Amino acid sequence: MKATVSTRLTQGLNLTPQLLQSIRLLQLTAPQLELELRQALERNPLLEQDEDDEAGETTLDGHDARVEDAAVEVASFDELPDPAFLSGGASGGSMDDDGMARIAAGSSTDPRVRLLQELALEWAAGDLPLAQWWLDHCDDRGYLEAPVDELAREGAQALAVEADALLYVRQRLLAGPWPGMAAADPPECLRAQLARLEDSPACTLAARIVSGHLDLLARHDHAALAKALGTNAEAVAEACALILSLRPQPVEDAPDAPDGAIIPDVVVRHLDGAWRVAVNTRGTPRVRVSAHCEAALAGANGHAELRGLLEEARWLVRGVAMRDDTLLRTAKVLVERQAGFLARGEEALVPLTLREVAHEIGMHESTVSRITTGKYIQTPRGTFELKRLFAVRLEGAEVSGAAVRAMVKRLIDDEPPHAPLADDTIAALLARRGIRIARRTVAKYRDQLQIGPARSRRRPAQALRAAG
């Protein structure tokens, strides 16, 4: 055996306690932040509540002074790679110290985040950005919003990887903990779920039904299925029962039931002809470092424990200021870009990505993702998640998929009851507006809206006259 000497250069990232705290505060929702600050006031005697500053809403006016001291630290958590955060790995600190322990229990309302957290436990860090690409281009049900080949080409260019590597990761998602995730259509989703089941005649027959006879399955025509597949009705009934036991969509619901009341993190109002954005601080205590305690420790020697508490208090105050500033700037960009949606509704929702917002505020995409995940915005149009203001651009058009879906819904709502619009007709009507989409895309949006095909929406003229 021959001994050899070699050199190797590696790059790593040490998460200091202060940096970890900044990341943790960044992702907290309004109720979680309130709980965090009240616990900090009880735990740290060098913190005190600012009674002079009335709690309410924080706007951009007068906000810069509060975050001026924190500007240096912003780049620290902004440059963190997303996989390191998701995996919870940190080389700074002991393994027994749970850096995220102070976050209130609960799961993210964003299914993308929940799935990435699961994948981070098993997948290599280098595969997570590729998985995130596919998940970012899935709708709320877990289906891809554009053709697979198109997304693979765009992803290869955006991530500087081979298209085959992206396609391989998509296959892993299909067979992953949420079977069928990133599927192109319902048949692919169902096939992915069937592939995880134990091989049996019923499973094989179910795969054949899913692949080519979903129309007969939808009509519950077991006789036609038996004839088309060359088998008996009993086998078809068993296969259909197996299919009906599968999930119609890959996205799993959050394990925690949402609270009945939602506390918005951001409030938007339309005043004097302009949109005003504010961070909601009602109910959240304003904390500051006790001035007299800080002055007493400034000229004293020793007191290592108290000095540690002082440093912790300073970092908490700075971290909260950084969190509020990042949330406010992000929300302001979202409101400016989606002002049409706030004024006119879903059809005016323009394409907007994490990258565009990150470029606008001068931060990384992962920071924008963290600050918008699980956060709610209150607007005159209702209260909803900030993530709803992001939209994927439709191929070949300057509109978002969500806007086109709203247009499809309006066309169907306005159609004559005795002559409903077929998918081809809807596609032709949209083409007149410069929005060219395929018939199958119309069918996809119609399915998302839980609207049946034209034949199921038709009402006979006799029934209409009788109703009138």
Image: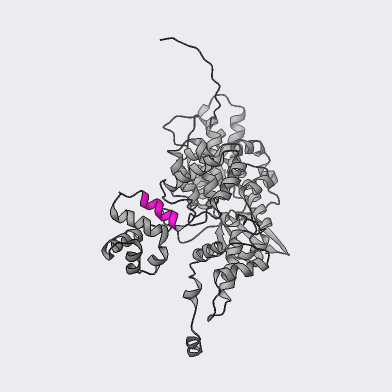
Q: Residue at x 69, y 44 (%)?
A: 65
Q: Residue furthest right?
A: 272
In depth, the one of 186 and 105 nearer the eye is: 186
**x and y percent of residue 228 in the render?**
36, 64
Classified by dominant secondary structure, the portion drawn in magenta counts as helix
Q: Is residue 200 above or below residue 298?
A: below
Q: Residue at x 44, y 48 (%)?
A: 174
The chosen color scheme is one colour
In which quarter of the view is residue 246 placed? bottom left
**x and y percent of residue 343 in the render?**
66, 65
- Indicate whether residue 101 is drawn in magenta: no
With 78 as the anchor, is 374 left or right in this view? left
**x and y percent of residue 212 in the render?**
42, 60
Residue 44 appears in the picture as rendered: no
In depth, the one of 426 and 370 nearer the eye is: 426
**x and y percent of residue 311 in the render?**
56, 33
In which quarter of the view is residue 348 placed? bottom right
Q: Residue furthest left?
A: 234
Q: Residue at x 36, y 52 (%)?
A: 194
Residue 219 appears in the picture as rendered: yes
In which quarter of the view is residue 72 placed? top right
With 339 as the anchor, is 45 left or right in this view? left
Query: How many numbered circles does the render carry?
Result: 0
Q: In the picture, which quadrant includes the N terminus?
A: top left
Q: Which residues are magenta?
A: 187-195
